[in-house]
Image (tube, coloured by chain):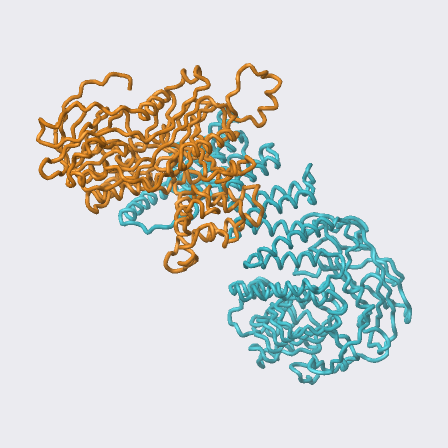
Amino acid sequence: MSDPLPPYPPLDPTTYDLIIIGTGLPSSVISAAASSSGSSVLHLDPNPFYASHFASLSLPDLTSYLNSNTLSPPPPSNNTHDDSSFLSLDLVNRSLYSSLEISTFEPDILEETSRSFNIDLSGPRVVFCADESINLMLKSGANNYVEFKSIDASFVGDSNGELRSVPDSRGAVFNDKSLDLIEKRQLMKFFKLVQTHLADEKDVKVVSEEELESSFVEFLEKMCLPNKIKSIILYGIAMLDYDQDDGETCGCLLKTKEGLDRLALYITSIGRFSNAHGALMYPIYGQGELPQAFCRRAAVKGCIYVLRMPVTALLLDKETGGYKGVRLASGQEIFSQKLVLDPCVTVGLESLSSLTDQQKETIRVLVPKEISSKEKIARGICIIRGSVKAEISNALIVYPPKSLFPEQLTAVRVLQLGSGLAVCPPDMHVLYLSTVCDNDDQGKTALLSAMSTLISPHVPENLPSDSVDENVTAEAKPLLLWRALYVQELVKGEFGGNISSTSSPDGNLNYNEIVESAVKLYEQLMGSEELFKEETSQEDTTEDNDGDGVEIED
Amino acid sequence: MHGRPRKAYKPEEEAASAAKAAKLRILQTQFMSNHHNKIYTKEAVDLSTKLLEINPEAYTAWNYRKLAVEDKLSRIESDPDLVKTILDEELSVVESALRQNFKSYGAWHHRKWVLSKGNSSVANEMRLLDKFQKLDSRNFHAWNYRRFVVELTNRSEQDELKYTDNMIGSDFSNYSAWHNRSVLLSNLLARKADGFLPNAKIPDEYELVHSAIFTDEDDQSGWFYHLWLLDQTVNVETPLLTSSWPSHGSRINLSAGCLNDSFSKLTTFCSESGSFPLILYFDQAVGGVSSATVTIDSELKGNEDLVWEPVSKKNSQMSSVWVAHLKYMSSEPCFRKEYEVKVRVGNSPGIVSSRGCNFSKSYEFIFTAHVHDTVQGSQEDIVSWTDGFDIWDAESKDLYSLVNLNRSNAQMDFKWRQEAIAEEIILFRKLSDSKIGKLTLARLLMAKAVISDDVVKGVDYNEILELYKDLMVLDSSHYQYYKDEHSVALLHKVTSSTDDLSRHLFRYRNMNNSVCLRLNNLSLSRIASVAKLLFVQMLDLSHNELHSTEGLEAMQLLSCLNLSHNKIRSFSALDSLRHLKQLRVLNVSHNHIGEHSVDTTRYLCSSPLSNSEWTQDEVGRKTPNLVTKYWDAYFVLRDLNLKQLDITGNAIARDEFSSFVLQVVPKLVWLNGKKLES
């Protein structure tokens, strides 16, 4: 990004059905869907890379992206409103990130290898095999551009710092030494109940209507599940954030219905693809591959892509106040029926005051509103030497509320990824951490606590090595090489007529909600057209030759 | 490979398969002509390769290839390189055939044949197997072949056991892996390999299979393995003597006629023949019981070379029941005298179980035989079964020795077995809300009863009976099995203590107050616990649901038997009665004999067509057509020495059959309640 921007070539044509700004996952899904339904789409991104907030970047790129975005100066408004027949509103790139802290402990080693990293901006995130994103990829044909690998294991950390594997399948329950026979039976019975519940929704009611509306944690208690299993189900499988035993303080008690839906997603993920073991998988080269796959799909269908192209202003009709188009950083004015914006795009506050109500209505998704929830997501990235669990490279670890320290309010999720996924050099691992928080300090405290449980702090090199080494290797914790901590704002996508905006990365582990909301936004934008209708009939026979399409390597 | 739904063929698929069939037919014809003309040229062999690539099931083609290989091998004068080339070619043909159909018997068999020729790399076979078993871990062909290959290599059974560990770990529904585990463990335990003592290893195995059962109790694999483990826990390889008649320490009264009431009827045996049966009852079928392996030490004359006979189906020299007839009336009359008889079983080695295990160690028992004068002449009165029964006033002293079985000759440790079973019972009570859980609990409780040394209290039996009753209701498709098991448990209960047994003992007034065991009206469908009933001479099994008399053959003293109102469907179901040389009175009235025109049980016995012996005897010569018609009745009745027979209430009991019976059993006095005129 330090390179000077090349001169912008003029775009042709200058009128489109849809202009999309930002190449994050929701935007890419919409662009692929709109392109394949025949709309003309211009897809712009101010960054020199695809995937926006969902990108996977090399170490220097990541650092500079986080830095520039946390303190980005508003672009100079080089154009005046006067000479145009339109009302022009300056757009500002607002940052989603705050409280950024980056520490490097081994600059030499990282310098050599910095380009061999593919680090996710919105980690930890994995794909559930039955995830909506997978369905959409299969439907759109985007699956041809991505390859996945399974996450080897999944653990729940207990208050003693021990990692207990998540017994999420028959095989895992059978092999789990920490469960006694009765617990194995209870757990499997519960899984079977969930499966029966899923199988015959209408015929046999295994779970009553009343139970579905009551709290999930109560339901689990009714099933006579002991605490440790309850905790595994709530945080290790249903992936809940808030302490369910303490409903009053957080006010986020999950209903049984939703809880069962979450379990269903997990359970149906297991065994969906014969060559995937377990429920979770991850795209090789990082999660940035997913939006890119949809973008490639869109490009095949005629969508025009321009990267490094910020949009500086919105153009509104002077008379009606309706949306007309955008002005690019190149100065060119481009017109479209509809516009979809990246969540970090906003208008300068000073320009808002002069607008009529009509104009305000047009750009309503950009008008800052009272934020109902101050919920944020604290993220952490660690580059480590060694692994948090011997002989396991790719693993998910969940620390339920109160497991790290008594005041821990929300679950902390940790994802370790290794060189097998082409995200880091061999012998290193990348660790992603996240937790939902109300304020930056609270989130960071939780993440740091999880880090200190898993990783040994950086040790100065002058320590005697030979004598200690033998003892240490037995339970050696991995060594921290690099660390980043930041807090990301959660912005919800919004449909606003001709101008809409997409969501920022959410606090979930999977893509389900993001993709669902993108699909919903698309349907609102384009009428209730079914997504990728054409593709399913056409490509089933031609490209989809291995049946389920998603390629998963062992 | 498992759980894939079948799809109906589309028209184009059908067309393709028709074309394939046509091509196959041409190939087949060419191949057959090559085969018949013994053409083993390269072209001919290639043709068979082509055929097998399309259809690996063409067994003849595999056999042809074997001949072709033999032909080639005979020409090349054992150049090892050439031999290897020829055999490798075969292996690659098999491999491609297996890719076509992984479950082709012919292909796997051919591979075994090639391997058995030597010259092939066994290590390569293991690699191939690992690949195949990864693709389909439950394919039993691959597992079979694996056992074959392992036998050729020096791979240890311990290593193979670890392999089953891995396979079960990755999918515990792998029945083949569990099965292989049981095979390997059987071998390791049998040869007492290092670290494989049953008392240490079996409990570990229980722990492993518990994990499978408690994780998914609907999966059968674990339950099968559990059943195998239970069998390992309860049953002992070395054969044991369970009981005998006369029993150890007993005192029997012998007489040629009837004795007066002053003697215990329980221990009195009267027979005109002047000999009495000595019965040995083992816990499993054994062979090799003879005057060499079982020695008799007594003053009773003429018993030096006893003939021991197995009480079993024809021609089998293996049986759990063996009998010899001891003479007590030799040429010199020596009445009113007591003789001590010492029987030593397993005096010299030779008593061997069907699995090749030797009788544990020599075991001696002693009884006293009291020979009496005849007081009254033998009776010819009809035995009515309906009345004349009095409650038997207990002579429990005599009875006690009968219900207490010989466990003293067991040298093995029962302690760990009892502990293991006790633990299992505690655990499986928690699963007793399911059918298989109930069944397993019932089996465990039964196992506990079987391996306890003391007389077991009745409490457990009642629980077993309740469990089987529940199961009969819950799982009606296996009703008969539960019914049979219920009967077995009930008979164990009846014979578990002197109190229980004496409740079923009666005096029969009309026959000189003989002791009658009445097990009527118990809805029994199967006979069991015979080892404790060897003393019985009069047995009432009427009003039950018996299909067969199997098991009664051990009751060598039996002279009166009531089987009326049961579910016996043919005379072949009475086949075991042929062994009862003392049987004089038989009531099979009100059964279903002759009701079913096609009686499947008849096929289980030797058919008259394959048996020419009947044509040689008198009845056969006189009325061959009747013998052909009633051959099953003929074989049973001919061997018996009946005085009284009741067959009324059966479809077969018509005049023709009655006249046939009179010919076969000329000594009969009473038929269907009527005295016959001699």
Q: Measured from the top left, where is residue B66 in percent x and y?
A: 48, 37
Total count of labels: 0
Q: Quadrant of the N terminus of chain B?
A: top left
B434 sits to left or right of A110: right
- Decide if residue B133 is in sight here: no
Chain shown cyan: that is B
Which tint was used for chain A? orange
Q: Measured from the top left, where is residue A60 in percent x and y?
A: 36, 20
In the foreground, A489 or B536? A489
Position of residue B119 relative to residue B555, above or below, is: above
Specify the quadrant of the image occupied by residue A321. Answer: top left
What residue is at 61 percent from the left and 34 percent from the top?
Answer: B156
In the foreground, B405 or B79? B405
- Decide if residue B665 is in sight here: yes
Q: Measured from the top left, where is residue B122 in percent x and y?
A: 53, 31
Q: Quadrant of the C terminus of chain B?
A: bottom right
In the foreground, B471 or A229? A229
Specify the quadrant of the image occupied by residue A46. Answer: top left
In the foreground, B581 or A306? A306
B456 sits to left or right of A302: right
B308 sits to left or right of A331: right
What residue is at 54 percent from the left and 35 percent from the top?
Answer: A161
Q: Measured from the top left, where is residue B287 in percent x and y?
A: 71, 53
B138 sits to left or right of A354: right
Position of residue B122 relative to residue B21, above or below, is: above
